Image: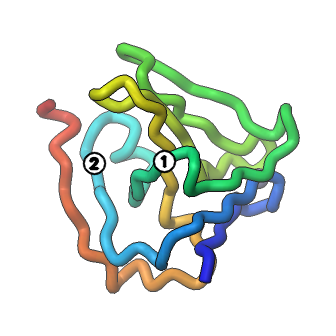
Amino acid sequence: MPVTGSCHCGAVAYTLDEEMPTGAMACNCSICQRRGYLLHFTTPEAVIIEAADDAMTDYSFGRGVIRHQFCRTCGCAPVGGGTGPDGKEVIVINLRCTDGIDLDALQIQHYDGAGA
Ligand SMILES: [Zn+2]
């Protein structure tokens, strides 16, 4: 069954062609800490993102390799993207926006983004 999710107002939605993730990455960098992301990394081929052209806005900082996208209307950040270490496009799903997910059951992998 595909995994679906959306921002709060529904302007931005995603469908992930994978089994429900059982783990997530929690990062302590300056933005992840503030936003409380639970991250799942995947490829552009595995995701369909439905959003009007102007539904999302971007926030980039530092080296600008990650697009911290969020819904212009409700401020939620269901999906983002960036470039991986190998130069390939990476899509980042925020599992906090996933429909029907049991967040407490996720195996959390802590990433020291603040120290990296
Ligand atoms: Zn929204």
Q: Quadrant of residue 48?
A: bottom right
x%, y% of residue 56? 74, 37
Left or right: residue 78 versus residue 32 is right
x%, y% of residue 96? 51, 66
Left or right: residue 88 versus residue 108 is right
Q: Which residue is mark 1?
A: 43
x%, y% of residue 111? 19, 49
Sort mark 1 into few (<14), some (14-19) or many (20+) by Cα contacts within 10 Å. few
Q: Secondary structure at mark 2?
A: strand
Residue drawn at the location 25% of the way across and 75% of the way down: 107
Depicted 110 relative to depicted 2: above or below: above
Q: Quadrant of residue 113?
A: top left
Tell me, yes or no, if residue 36 can be seen here.
no
Q: Give the spatial CA distance, label 1 vs label 2.
A: 19 Å
Q: Secondary structure at mark 1?
A: loop
Residue drawn at the location 60% of the way across and 83% of the way down: 1
Label at residue 31: none
Say which amino acid is labelled 2.
Answer: Cys
Query: Which quarter of the figure is the C terminus placed in?
Result: top left
Tell me, yes or no, if residue 76 can be seen here.
yes
Label at residue 27: 2
The residue at label 2 has a CB less than 8 Å from ligand 1: no
Which of these two is toward me, 72 or 1?
1
